[in-house]
C-alpha cells in the first residue's frame, strides 16, 4: 500500500484561510462588545467592549442614541410636547431629536426602555453581518475581504455607530432592502421600493440624497437585462412622500439636535470652523474671514478629488468590473447600492455637520474598491482607486485614533489634514464615481 502524498495548501489557500480567520475573529469581537455592553450581569467585562473608542465614547445606560427612542416610545404626550421638552422620557434628559416616523415605528413594534439591550444587539449584529456578507460576496479574494472587513469593524465610525446605536443603523438596513427592491425585476419586490424609500427618508432625511443619486442611472432602458426605470421613479416618489412627513418637524429637530463643534468626532463641509475659531480666539469680521477661508480650502480639495477621479478614468475601471462580473453578481444591484449609500454620505457631507458614524454609508464603496483591487489589474484607474478612495477612507476612519494618542498639539494637526485635505478629496472622488455610474451601468451585458 503506497503512502498517499499530502497535498500542501497553496499560498492562495493560506491567504484565504487567514482572511476568513481575521473576518471571523473581528466579527466575534463586535458581537462580544454588543452583548457585554448590553447585559447588566456582564458589567465586569464591559471594560473590554468597544476598546478602540474607550477614550471618546462609552456611556451608561448603553446605546445612548437608541435609548432616546426606546424610552420615548412610551411617553404620554403629543409630539409637540416631546419636541418642546414639556414631556421628556430620555434617560439623559435630552430634547427629542428624531423624526416622528422613527418614534412611531418603535411604538408600533411595542418597544420600550426594557427593549434597549436586545434591540441594540440586534441592530449592531445585523449591520455587521450584512457588511461581512457584502464584502465576501463582492470581493473575489477572501484575504482582501477579511482585511478590509476587520478594518471596517475596528474603525472609529463603525465602533461609534454600534456603541451609540444611532438610528443610522436602522437607515443602513432599510437602504440595503431598498437597493434590492430598486434593482429587482420581480414585480413584488419592485412594489416595495416606494414604501422602503418612504421609511428610509421619513426615519432620517439624508437618504433622499441617495435616492436622487440613483436618478443618475440610465433612464429609458427597459429591456429585461436593464434596470427597471419604474422602480427608480417609485423610489423617488416614496422618498419625497417621506420628506413631506419630516418637513413639518424639521425646525424642532434641528433646534434640538446638538451640532458638532468640530474636531475628532465630526466632519462636514461646514464643520471645523467653530473649532478653529475657538483655537485661535477670533471674533467678528476675522471669524467670518476664517469661515470662508476654511470653506474655500475644502472646496478646492473637493474639486481636485473630482477632477483627479475623472481624469484618471476611475469610471472606466468600474465599467470593466461590472461587465466582467455580470455572470457572478448582479451589476444592477451593485450600482444601485453604491448610488444609494454613497449618495447619502455625499449629501450629508455637503449640507450638514455630521458625527463620524455617518461614514458607515461609505462601507459599500470600500467593498467595491476591494473588489476592484482584487482583480490584479494595474494602470492609472487602479492607482486612482487606491489614492482617491481607499487611502482617504482608511485615513478618515483611523486618523482620529492617532490624534487622540499623540495629544493635543499633534492631534489638531492630524485632524486638520484629515478634515481639510483627505475628506474633501474623498468627497470629490465619490461624487465623480456616482456620476460615472450612469455610463458604467451601460457596460452590463
Image (cartoon, rainbow, N blue to C red):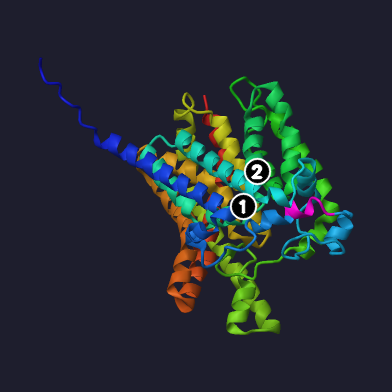
Who's the residue at 47% across and 54% down the image? 154
Query: In which quadrant of the rendered image does the N terminus lie?
Result: top left
Secondary structure category for the residue under label 1: helix
- Which quarter of the figure has residue 242? top right
CA neighbours of label 2 inside 10 A, class few (<14), some (14 to 19), many (20+): many
Residue 213 is labelled as 2
Above or below: residue 328 compared with residue 340: above
Indicate left or right for 283 with 7 as reference: right
Residue under numbered circle 1: 346
Judging depth in this view, the residue of 144 and 378 nearest the camera is 144
The first of marks 2 and 1 along the sequence is: 2
Q: Do the residues labelled 2 and 1 touch (CB within 8 Å)?
A: yes
Which residue ends up furthest to the left in the rendered image? 2
Q: Can residue 443 be seen in this view?
A: yes
- Which quarter of the figure has residue 439? top right
Indicate left or right for 134 with 165 as reference: left
* Residue 395 location (% of width, % of height): 46, 59
Judging depth in this view, the residue of 258 and 47 nearest the camera is 47
What is the C-alpha distance between the residues marked 2 and 1? 10 Å
CA neighbours of label 1 inside 10 A, class few (<14), some (14 to 19), many (20+): many
Residue 107 magenta-drawn?
Answer: no
* Residue 243 location (% of width, % of height): 79, 47
Amino acid at each position: 500500500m503506497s503512502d498517499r502524498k499530502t497535498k500542501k495548501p497553496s499560498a492562495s489557500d493560506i491567504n484565504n484561510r487567514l482572511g476568513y480567520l481575521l473576518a471571523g475573529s473581528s466579527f466575534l469581537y463586535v458581537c462580544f462588545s454588543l452583548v457585554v455592553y448590553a447585559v447588566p450581569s456582564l458589567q465586569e467585562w464591559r471594560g473590554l467592549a468597544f476598546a478602540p473608542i474607550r477614550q471618546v465614547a462609552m456611556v451608561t445606560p448603553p446605546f445612548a442614541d437608541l435609548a432616546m427612542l426606546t424610552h420615548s416610545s412610551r411617553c404620554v404626550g403629543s409630539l409637540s410636547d416631546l419636541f418642546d421638552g414639556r414631556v421628556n422620557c430620555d434617560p439623559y434628559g435630552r430634547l427629542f431629536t428624531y423624526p416622528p416616523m422613527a418614534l412611531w415605528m418603535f411604538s408600533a413594534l411595542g418597544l420600550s426602555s426594557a427593549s434597549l439591550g436586545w434591540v441594540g444587539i440586534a441592530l449592531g449584529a445585523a449591520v455587521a453581518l450584512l457588511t461581512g456578507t457584502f464584502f465576501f460576496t463582492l470581493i473575489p479574494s477572501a484575504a482582501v475581504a477579511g482585511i478590509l472587513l476587520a478594518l471596517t469593524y475596528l474603525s472609529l465610525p463603525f465602533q461609534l455607530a454600534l456603541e451609540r446605536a444611532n438610528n443610522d443603523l436602522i437607515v443602513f438596513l432599510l437602504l440595503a432592502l431598498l437597493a434590492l427592491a430598486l434593482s429587482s425585476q420581480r414585480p413584488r419586490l419592485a412594489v416595495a421600493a416606494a414604501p422602503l424609500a418612504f421609511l428610509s427618508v421619513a426615519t432620517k432625511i439624508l437618504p433622499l440624497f441617495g435616492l436622487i443619486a440613483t436618478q443618475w442611472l440610465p433612464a429609458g432602458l427597459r429591456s429585461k437585462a436593464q434596470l427597471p426605470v419604474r422602480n427608480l421613479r417609485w423610489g423617488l416618489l416614496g422618498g419625497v412622500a417621506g420628506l413631506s412627513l419630516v418637513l413639518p418637524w424639521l425646525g424642532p429637530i434641528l433646534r434640538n439636535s446638538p451640532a458638532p463643534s468640530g474636531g475628532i468626532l465630526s466632519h462636514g463641509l461646514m464643520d471645523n470652523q467653530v473649532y478653529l475659531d475657538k483655537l485661535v480666539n477670533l471674533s467678528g469680521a476675522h471669524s467670518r474671514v476664517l469661515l470662508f477661508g476654511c470653506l474655500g480650502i475644502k472646496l478646492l480639495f473637493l474639486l481636485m478629488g473630482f477632477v483627479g477621479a475623472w481624469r484618471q478614468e476611475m469610471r472606466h475601471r468600474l465599467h470593466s468590473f461590472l461587465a466582467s462580473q455580470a455572470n457572478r453578481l448582479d451589476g444592477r444591484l451593485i450600482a444601485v447600492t453604491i448610488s444609494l449609500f454613497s449618495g447619502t454620505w455625499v449629501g450629508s457631507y455637503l449640507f450638514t455637520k455630521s458625527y463620524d458614524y455617518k461614514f458607515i454609508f461609505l462601507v459599500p464603496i470600500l467593498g467595491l474598491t476591494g473588489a476592484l483591487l482584487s482583480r490584479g489589474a494595474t494602470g492609472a484607474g487602479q492607482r486612482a482607486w487606491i489614492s482617491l478612495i481607499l487611502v482617504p477612507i482608511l485615513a478618515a476612519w483611523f486618523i482620529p485614533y492617532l490624534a487622540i494618542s499623540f495629544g493635543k498639539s499633534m492631534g489638531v494637526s492630524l485632524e486638520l489634514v484629515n478634515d481639510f485635505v483627505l475628506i474633501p478629496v474623498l468627497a470629490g472622488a465619490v461624487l465623480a464615481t456616482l456620476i460615472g455610474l450612469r455610463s458604467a451601468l451601460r457596460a452590463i451585458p
